[in-house]
Structure formats: C-alpha cells, structure tokens
Image (cartoon, rainbow, N blue to C red):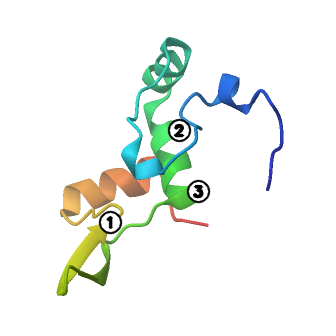
Amino acid sequence: MKVYSKHVHCLFPQHAPGKKHERPIVLEAWQRAIVDAHPWDFIRGLIHSDGCRMTNWTTRVVAGERKRYEYNISVAKKASVALMDTHVGPKH
C-alpha cells in the first residue's frame, strides 16, 4: 500500500526525511493516548506489519572488519511467548 499526501506528516509525525534509524521515536500526545488505551493492539500491529518472533541478523564489512548486526524482536521465555500468543496471535 502506498499513500501520497502533503498531510502524511500530520497523521504520522515520525514520517520525515532521512534515515528511519536515526530519527527519534517520539509519540505525539494523541498517539500516546491511543497506545496507552490499547497497548496490545499496538504491539499486534507492529508484529504483524513488520516484526517477527526471532532475532534476524546480517553481517557487513565496516572499515575492513566484518561486523554482525541483529535486529527485530526476540521472545524466548515460555511465559513471554504464551503472553504474546494470547494477545498478538500468529503472524499472518
């Protein structure tokens, strides 16, 4: 899905020029109110849209040295996995 509008930044203030990983993750007051009221819906949306239940990794050569980078989420403890299954469900 693609969205083109001059007002995307009004709905999603985090959408801005530059690299995503260099921008701060700061919710506006109206966003915080929604997340506070529906935290598991928020987590479910993150996991189903772009997350996973394991740690992905890749390597990259930086200044002549191979470095390993890990990203995404890892849920491993039995109780935590059960909680995630209850509130998030399987990834579609």
Q: Which mark is residue 41?
A: 2
Q: Secondary structure at mark 2?
A: helix
> Which of the 4 quarters of the picture holds residue 60?
bottom left
In the image, 6 versus 80, the foreground residue is 6
| Apparent side of residue 39 relative to residue 74 in the rendered image (left or right) | right
- Residue 57 vertical position relative to residue 86 in the rendered view, above or below: below
Name the residue at the right extreme: 4
Residue depth check, mark 3 versus mark 1: number of the one nearer the observer? 1
Task: Specify few, some or many for label 3: CA neighbours under 10 Å numbering under 14, 14-19, or 20 or more.
Answer: few
**Nearest-to-viewer mark from 2 and 3:** 3
- Which is nearer the N-term, disc 2 or disc 3? 2
> In the displayed structure, does residue 65 sit left or right of residue 74?
left
Determine whether 8 is above or below 63 in the image. above
Callout 1 environment at 10 Å: few (<14), some (14 to 19), or many (20+)? few
Q: Secondary structure at mark 1?
A: strand
Residue 24: x and y in percent read 38, 35
Q: Secondary structure at mark 3?
A: helix
User: Would you name the residue on which mark 1 appears?
Assistant: 71
Q: Which residue is the site of mark 3?
A: 49
Residue at the spot 59% in from the left edge and 38% down from the top edge: 15
Residue at image location 46% in from the left, 61% down from the top: 51
User: Do callouts 1 and 2 mark residues in contact (Cβ within 8 Å)?
Assistant: no
The amino acid type found where label 3 is placed reads Ser
